[in-house]
Amino acid sequence: MRYLIIAISSFFCIETHAGVVLSIEQVADGIYVHQGKHEWPDHKNHGAIANIGFIVGERCVAVIDTGGNPEEGKSLKRAIAKTTGKPICYVINTHVHPDHIFGNIAFKEPGTQFVGHHKLARAMAARGQFYIDKAEDQIGMALSAEHIIPPDIEVEKTLLLDLGGRELLLTAHPTAHTDNDLSIYDQKTDTLWLGDLFFIGHLPTLDGSLKGWLAELMELERKSFKQVIPGHGPVVTDWPKSLEPQKRYLGTLLTEIRKMIRNGKFIEDAIEQVGYEFKGEWLLFDEFHKKNVTAAFAELEWED
Amino acid sequence: MINKIIEALCLALIANGALAAEDESAWTSQLKDQFFAGRTITESDAVIDLDAPYRAEDPALVPLKIISKIPQTNDKYIKKILVLVDKNPFPYVGEFEFTPDSGKADLAMRVRVNTYSFVRAIAETNDGKLYMSKKFVKASGGCSAPIGADLDAAMKRLGKAKFRLSDNIKPGEANEAQLFISHPNITGMQMDQVTRFVKKSHFVNRVNVSFNDKPILTAKTDIAISADPNFRFYFIPEKNGILKAEFTDISCQSPTSRANCKAGQSFTETLAIKP
């Protein structure tokens, strides 16, 4: 009986996915975004939680992040085909996290080049197997090594991609959210796609360097952009004001953890005590805050 | 095709159910015999008590604490503690030897926990008896991985070490000391077929701490120790002296076998203690 129920529920799951066209919104001329829901990746959402989308040029299309599973990648591809007849020339991955790269395989075909930070391939090598092993348990998807697709084009510092009448400026950032964050700037519409360097509503997750991240944000907030697209949350038009909550959260982690280290406190103390005033302010706080404190503490205790 | 997918999903769901259960099979069917063949182990928290978070918030860094329940005297003391994470690809975390000069056989460290698993500590007292304390740890998920976040930063500092002690050292009593070692403790990477990236494991394999040349903590460690290994332990400073840590690293061909390894570098860090 149990087998039967599983079989039936699995079947419906596939039914609902077949032929799905991902919902997208045009946020600027030729820039389309699917806004992910602020959820923990699980068997219901199959890891499809991040903002993903594409930018259309006169010659071809650049995909920016492909989603949390191959099906989401496919439904993004269908949305592109419904929007434009132009071919997909680039797939840009903003960083290594599974909710941004596990749709890659849907776009693997001749003529499409994958683009990433110069440290993305290494991060994929280090984490890929682990993410694959976890996929069944976490998001109910059986994945394999073929789902980890490293970049064909690596961005050392910056790179201009020409989509025909539209140039995208890609920037490989120093270690911040991860050690392989890549942002995309579209000159034509003055839009910056920041990926997970920028969170709204969903607690920022630290998997790189707290100090590095805050330093990058200080650089970015000096500039003005018409639109900024976060990795999680709505597209904003009030940059840098909309960055304030994230800066406050990360800044507090920095000051409070430094203080604890100076006072001879241990990592367990910091995990239990630092940053809980932000609990009501962010979604997924319980899921990620302790990890953030842990990673930040381990980084900051090497400061002196 | 659809049938095959359903079958795969079914298997995945069933495997998922099994994963979440508190499963001791790795210990009972393999690890116990591998490390303690034919020996009796008393399961009890009366000699050592292992403290671990129920959820591994950051699988790359799970703080573990072992609290000893008996004092280290010349007559009776905890000689050795073995730490295992049952379900890790390489379950052996390390072996830690203490002496009566340790004062207390307490030990805190940071480990990698790959999946839902029991973490266990088995203490051997100087009379040859074995006592085990264990905790079940739920793996975390999301974007987390049991890999250090900033490999290059850790690489740059490799071999750097420091001690940290309370400002107020009490002579003749067991005092807590913390040893920080900067080392990426690379687990090894196996995705070379896809990403062209091959990397051997490269980790701290020995840590010897002494006070005035008397051993306090002698450890054999492995890849389950988090990047930037960090240990808290006790020692008894009777008088002024030198607290010294000597450690070495090693690189191995495979993340899960120690058959083909090459010794690396040795490092030393000292601190003058004035109680």
Image: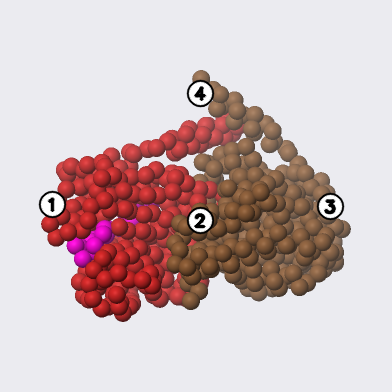
Q: Nearer the viewer, mark 1 or mark 3?
A: 1
How far apart are the two marked residues, 1 and 2, measured between alpha carbons? 38 Å
Which residue is at the front of the view, A156 or B275? Answer: B275
The type of residue carrying mark 2 is: Ile
Q: Tag 1's secondary structure?
A: loop
Q: Tag 2's secondary structure?
A: helix
Chain part drawn in magenta:
B88-105
How far apart are the two marked residues, 1 and 3, measured between alpha carbons? 74 Å
The type of residue carrying mark 4 is: Arg
Q: Are marks 1 and 3 in contact (CB under 8 Å)?
A: no
Categorize mark 3 by other alpha carbons within 10 Å: few (<14), some (14-19), many (20+). few
Q: Nearer the viewer, mark 4 or mark 2?
A: 2
Residue A85: % across, % down: 82, 51
The residue wearing badge 2 is: A271
Q: Is residue B103 magenta?
A: yes
The type of residue carrying mark 1 is: Asp
Q: Is residue B56 above or below residue A228?
A: above
Kindly identify which chain the residue marked by label 4 belongs to. A
| Chain-order first, disc 3 or disc 4 | 4
The residue wearing badge 3 is: A26
Task: Check chain identity for marks 4 and 2: say if they share one.
Answer: yes
The residue wearing badge 4 is: A2
